[in-house]
Amino acid sequence: MKKIIYIGLGVALIGGAVVTLMNNKKQNEADTAIVAQENSSVAVRVATVTTGPIEDNFIANGNFAPAQELNFAAERSGKVISVLVKEGDRVAQGQTLAIIRGDVVNVEAQTANANYQNALNDYNRFESAFKTGGVTKQQLDQARINMVNAKSRLTQANINVGDTRVKAPFSGIINKKYIEVGSILSAMPPTQMFEIVNTSSLKLKVAVSESQVAQLKIGSSVKVKVSVYPDKEYTGKVTFIAPKADASLNFPIEVAIANNTNNEIKAGMYGSVVFGSNEGKQAELMTIPRSAFVGSVSSNQVFVVENETAKLKKVVAGRVFGNKVEVLNGLNKGDVVVTSGQINLSDNTKVSIVK
């Protein structure tokens, strides 16, 4: 009898424990739902859409390159018997830089000239004889062919003689000299001889974005600055705008600038070009931080906070001014846009603003 009573009490205790556990589970689920509801918002940082004056200029940086540069090689084989310039010398177009031994080609030129004179005399005799019927038309034509061929060989021989004097292809400065007296030149593969650069004018090569390239025109005057001369300002001209973007989706631009008489700007120096109005004209524009755009500026999408809810909106972006982007349509002054935390957002997500 006592055994039955103990069993009954055990069952009652177990049943009570089960009921208590079930009640506790329901309470925990209810508490978790309340906490989840309270913490469902996503923390974000925001910025307010403003309008104000923006300087209508933008800056691009790059390196100066010489207007002309050439690392040229030997056109014929031979031994160098004279080098007439050294590194750093300024040379004019057509100036002789080096002389190659030309004994053989000189003899060949003399022989070619003698052969031509003989062929010319033969042709003159055949022409006179043809008038009196002494030779046939065929013989006269053959004499003419011989004369023309002899003249061609003489022309080639004279070219070979001229090639023994290496001349500057354009005016510039000898940047590097690869040969010395006694050097043996080869035409195949060609031996490197000189590197000439012309820095009387230079090109500043920069790259601009899609929105910036639309503002540029070939021939426009721009301000140019050199990093090593911060107090000086130069005037350049846009000479090239790439018709196609590079791998980074930027457009290569070239700006020509005339060097001063001292050639103080060196090729390879770092420079900046200021595009836009020379007066630094300012305009009243509506702008938002660049970081407000979802993904990139080209997406034209931003999250706008309304009643603690993030709304995904389509906008029309304009020009880029550093970390600010012009907004042409889709927003109003005073709107609050999300600038950080977009990765966790979708349309109509609850948000909490982090100060």
Image (cartoon, rainbow, N blue to C red):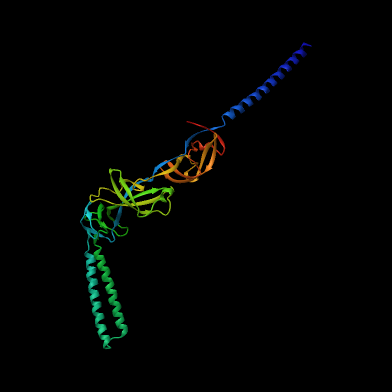
Image quadrant where residue 190 sits? bottom left
Observer-nearest of 340 and 75: 340
Q: Is residue 241 above or below residue 140?
A: above
For residue 320, side relative to residue 25 (left or right): left
**Place of residue 228 in the rendered image (x, y in percent of width and height, measured from the top left):** 28, 43
Q: Is residue 16 above or below residue 77?
A: above
Observer-nearest of 336 and 138: 336
Give the residue displayed 25% in from the left and 74% down from the top.
Answer: 116
In the rendered image, the quadrant that contains the N terminus is top right
Q: Is residue 185 above or below residue 113?
A: above
Give the residue displayed 77% in from the left and 11% down from the top.
Answer: 2
Observer-nearest of 8 and 53: 53
**Place of residue 19 in the rendered image (x, y in percent of width and height, measured from the top left):** 70, 21
**Place of residue 323 in the rendered image (x, y in percent of width and height, measured from the top left):** 42, 40
Single out the residue that lies furthest toward the top. 2
Count of numbered circles in the view: 0
Give the residue displayed 27% in from the left and 68% down from the top.
Answer: 156
Single out the residue that lies furthest toward the right. 1
**Place of residue 26 in the rendered image (x, y in percent of width and height, measured from the top left):** 66, 25
For residue 300, side relative to residue 166 (left or right): right
